[in-house]
Image (cartoon, rainbow, N blue to C red):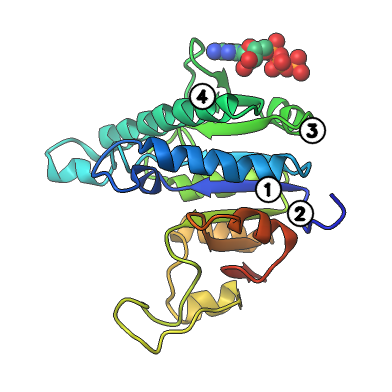
Amino acid sequence: MSQLKYKRVLLKLSGEALMGQQQYGIDPHRIAQYAQEIKKAIDKGIEIAIVIGGGNIYRGLQASETGIDRVQGDYMGMMATVINGMALQDVLENHGMVTRLMSAIEMKQICEPYIRRKAVRHLEKNRIVIFAAGTGNPYFTTDTAATLRAIEVEADVILKGTRVDGVYSADPEKDKNATRYERISFEEVYNRGLSVMDMTAFTLCKENNLPLIIFDMNQEGNLLKVLKGDSIGTLVNN
Ligand code: GTP
């Protein structure tokens, strides 16, 4: 435990990443791979809360294109995160971890309602807490939900697991001279117009002094490396 840099973390997983090679839904290999990564961290005594997106099932922003009202679409997106949360809970438990699924929108038959103090107790007992249904409000992303919950449960850091391995000076797919930042300040991210999270989430992080690490979650061993403080991905802080 002593060699790890963090004690309590909030892991943000994108819904899209769960698709793996598929066009839609949940790739069983990908979710199992995530479970193995998370198990390595839990076995080291790290307290982990997870917020998962829903983009592999439904994206709120899509809604307007299909003629569905934006707010209605956002709620549909929140439901998608509950489905992902249920899947993740099941897979994590099959891998021997203890979990609690909490939802920002009450649906008692399938998950606990989100109660901050209860969430903190679960974490103290080394249970993985999965926060589903975003913030429970339309117009907020799951990145914002992740930031809000991280602040509420006093996580040391947000770990944003993505397909890219950090923040680059330019789009690495378009500009071969793009370089990855090992560390960058919130201010610099803003001044350079780099995108790491939407502005609401970004501002919440900055104002509450909550560091953020963007890293490639699909690379085996990376989660543990990040927890050890290795220079994986990009650290954004004040
Ligand atoms: P403590 O005993 O306080 O440490 O926590 P606990 O979560 O083990 O206690 P509790 O008796 O609250 O929960 C036992 C099981 O019931 C856990 O798997 C919870 O996730 C589940 N549970 C608790 N409250 C709810 C709820 O409102 N809805 C659903 N669906 N499950 C719940």
Task: Determine whether, in the image, residue 115 is placed left or right of residue 67.
Answer: right
Circles 2 and 4: CB atoms closer than 8 Å: no
Which label number is shown at residue 6?
2
- The mark nearer the N terminus, 4 or 1, is 1
Task: Determine whether, in the image, residue 174 is placed left or right of residue 177.
Answer: left
- Rendered residue at 50%/49% (across/down): 144
Cα distance between the residues tagged 4 and 1: 21 Å
Q: Is residue 64 above or below residue 170?
A: above
Q: Is residue 187 above or below residue 46?
A: below
Residue located farthest toward the top when viewing the structure as drawn? 109
User: Can you tell which of label 4 and label 1 is closer to the viewer?
Assistant: 4
What's the residue type where badge 1 is placed? Val
- Rendered residue at 40%/27% (across/down): 83
Q: Which residue is mark 1?
A: 9
Cα distance between the residues tagged 2 and 4: 26 Å
Q: Which residue is mark 4?
A: 90
Which quarter shows the C terminus? bottom right
Between 5 and 131, which is closer to the camera in this rendering? 5
- The mark nearer the N terminus, 2 or 4, is 2
- The mark nearer the N terminus, 3 or 1, is 1
Q: Is mark 4 within 8 Å of ligand 1?
A: no
Q: Is residue 98 visible?
A: yes
Cα distance between the residues tagged 2 and 3: 14 Å
